[in-house]
Image: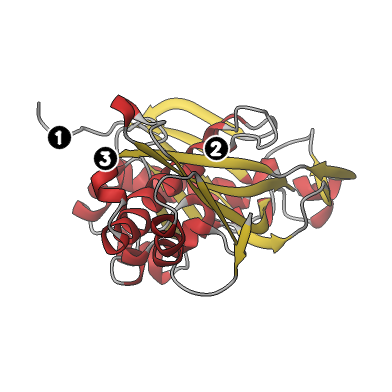
Amino acid sequence: MNVVTTGTPGARFAALATATPRKDVELGLHIALPTAFPLAATRPRYTVRHLLKTREIGDGAASYLRETHRGSDRSGTSYASTPEAGFRATAATAQPTGVTAELSVPAELTADPELLGTIVDHRLIVRLCTQENDALLNGSADGRIPGIRTLSGARRIAEPGADLARLVTETAALVEETGGSCDGIITHPVAYWELVRLGLLPRLVEVGVRVSRTRMLPPHELIFADFRAAFTLLDTMRSHLAIRRGAGQDGQDLLTATVSVGLAVHLPQHVVSRTAVVHGPPD
């Protein structure tokens, strides 16, 4: 497998793939491909990874500190009465895994280096971003990445809140009862744009809260957390692009993009999942 450390992923891959038009090709990159989506520079949109702190690791298991909690979720007025006074520190490990996106493309398009480069950069990598959001929120198929939505130890409030503005302030405060600082919210686009309509996004930005929107959770669910304290994205900085001739839908060429990542869960008690009454777009 060829390894490239500089240049645009799509253009580099297209040059290699079109030089051998009848052969399968794979290109290794020392980069996390989800960070290379070109439109993010002018159309910023936070993915789940943007809410997490990142640690670069090798290909093997990574050790980290995890703090477990089995007491109250509410603080008193002294340190001894806070939840974190009773946390227990344990050693944990996380194993990275590959997250892959696929795209079938007609062979006449993959034969054009400029067009193929654009397809990889603008269409394949954005699908990889969605696949990574899915893995981080709902867990990877092999179980190596635990889903943030289903974490053991996270707090869940099933009773729906009808006033979205009040729900946001109440739940952000609940995150802080276990010693965290609410620095992020994950929403479905339906809830995100309702926050826009209510004028809440600038206020959240002002206090350092990032809002990530993704379709990988239900429209009525919002996840609040001290994401940078609760999690570390374990990034191998290893990705690869590949083309398999004729292996896609209807005999088209199959493009794949893969990134290798893991997730360390330090403080699941800093996560609060909340159900809101959010009205979607009209049918």
Amino acid found under the numbered disc labelled 2: Ala
Q: Position of residue 106 (x, y in %)?
A: 26, 40
- Which dot, 3 or 1, sits closer to the camera? 3
- Relative to 50, is 259 above or below? above
In depth, the one of 93 and 251 nearer the eye is 251
Cα–Cα span, label 3 and label 1? 34 Å
The disc, 2 or 3, on the residue closer to the chain's N-terminal end is 3
Residue occupying image coordinates x 48% and y 37%: 134
Look at the image and tell me in which quarter the N terminus lies. bottom right
Helix, strand or loop at label 2? It is: helix
Q: Position of residue 148 (x, y in %)?
A: 58, 38
The disc, 1 or 2, on the residue closer to the chain's N-terminal end is 2
Amino acid found under the numbered disc labelled 1: Pro
Residue occupying image coordinates x 59% and y 71%: 5
Q: Which residue is mark 1?
A: 281
* Colouring: secondary structure
Mark 2 is surrounded, within 10 Å at the Cα level, by few (under 14), some (14 to 19) or many (20 or more) other residues, namely: many
Q: Position of residue 258 (x, y in %)?
A: 54, 46
In depth, the one of 35 and 174 nearer the eye is 35
Q: Position of residue 249 (x, y in %)?
A: 32, 27
- Which dot, 2 or 3, sits closer to the camera? 3
Cα–Cα span, label 1 and label 2? 26 Å
- Relative to 228, is 67 above or below? above
Q: Which residue is mark 3?
A: 106
Residue 135 got which mark? Answer: 2
Cα–Cα span, label 2 and label 3? 28 Å
Amino acid found under the numbered disc labelled 3: Pro
- Which dot, 1 or 2, sits closer to the camera? 2
Q: Is 240 left, or right, of 39 in this rendering? A: right
